[in-house]
Amino acid sequence: MKNKGMMIGCAIGAVVLLAVGMLVIWGISSYNNMVSLDQAVIQSWAQVENQYQRRADLIPNLVNTVKGYADFEKEVLTKVTEARARVSQFNITPEVLNDPQAFAKFQSLQGELSGALSRLLVTVENYPQLKANENFLQLQAQLEGTENRISVERKKFNEVVQSYNTTIKRFPASIMAGMFGFGEKQYFKAIQGAETPPKVEF
């Protein structure tokens, strides 16, 4: 009887150890998966930032080219310059992804800049000589390409964020997410008037 009791005890102990081992392995795997997804979000965010920065770098040349036309509407240029300045002053860190208000502010500023650029490019329609300027045409083509890349990278970013957010919300992974501080990331959302890139084809 004593041996039988010991065998049962050993069997129970083995089952418990196996269960604990499996739980530990699951926990490590789940944690590593969340880390990988978190890094994928950060990497995708960097690509979005790169495209926004590329656009910001093009704007001074665009504005200077348009300024060469003395009768061009100064107010339109001023709004583009001011919108770019506000975007540049916004401190962008990876923490923005975890802060709904900061992310909304970032998106709003970028939306304002997109709107200002749209108005600038529409206004150019009234200036045939400017529309034919080789430097302007090159900048226009670069801007169009950048706007398209921004749209593509934002879409990719939202897809990566969706994968991450879905993972950390699913049970039982949600327990691990809560224990190790994996919080929900923010999505890019359509802003009225900024759903599509500015039209730059004339």
Image: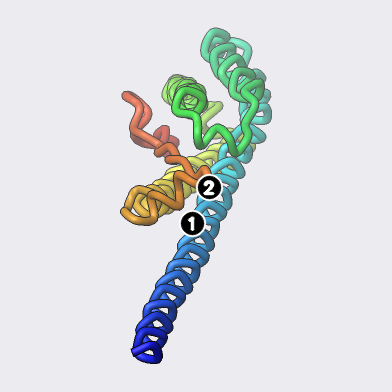
Mark number, residue 194 = none
- Out of 197 and 18, give the one closest to the viewer: 18
Q: Residue 51: x, y in percent?
A: 57, 43
Calculate the distance from the C-alpha at mark 2 to the C-alpha at mark 1: 10 Å
> Judging from the image, what secondary structure is the residue with disc 1 in?
helix
- Where does the C terminus fall, quadrant-wise? top left
Q: Quadrant of residue 173?
A: bottom left
Say what amino acid the circle numbered 2 marks. Answer: Phe
- Where does the N terminus fall, quadrant-wise? bottom left
Q: Residue 50: x, y in percent?
A: 61, 44
Q: Residue at x 42, y 24 (%)?
A: 122
- Out of 136 and 49, give the one closest to the viewer: 49
Task: Say if mark 2 contacts mark 1, CB within 8 Å.
Answer: yes
> Judging from the image, what secondary structure is the residue with disc 2 in?
helix
Mark number, residue 180 = 2
Badge 1: residue crowd in 10 Å (few <14, some 14–19, many ≥20): many
Q: Residue 187: x, y in percent?
A: 40, 39
Q: Residue 26: x, y in percent?
A: 44, 68
| Residue 128 seen | no
Mark number, residue 34 = 1
Q: Nearer the viewer, mark 2 or mark 1?
A: 2
Q: Quadrant of residue 20?
A: bottom left
**Residue 151 vertical placement versus 23 (above, below):** above
- Out of 201 and 117, give the one closest to the viewer: 117
Say what amino acid the circle numbered 1 marks. Answer: Met
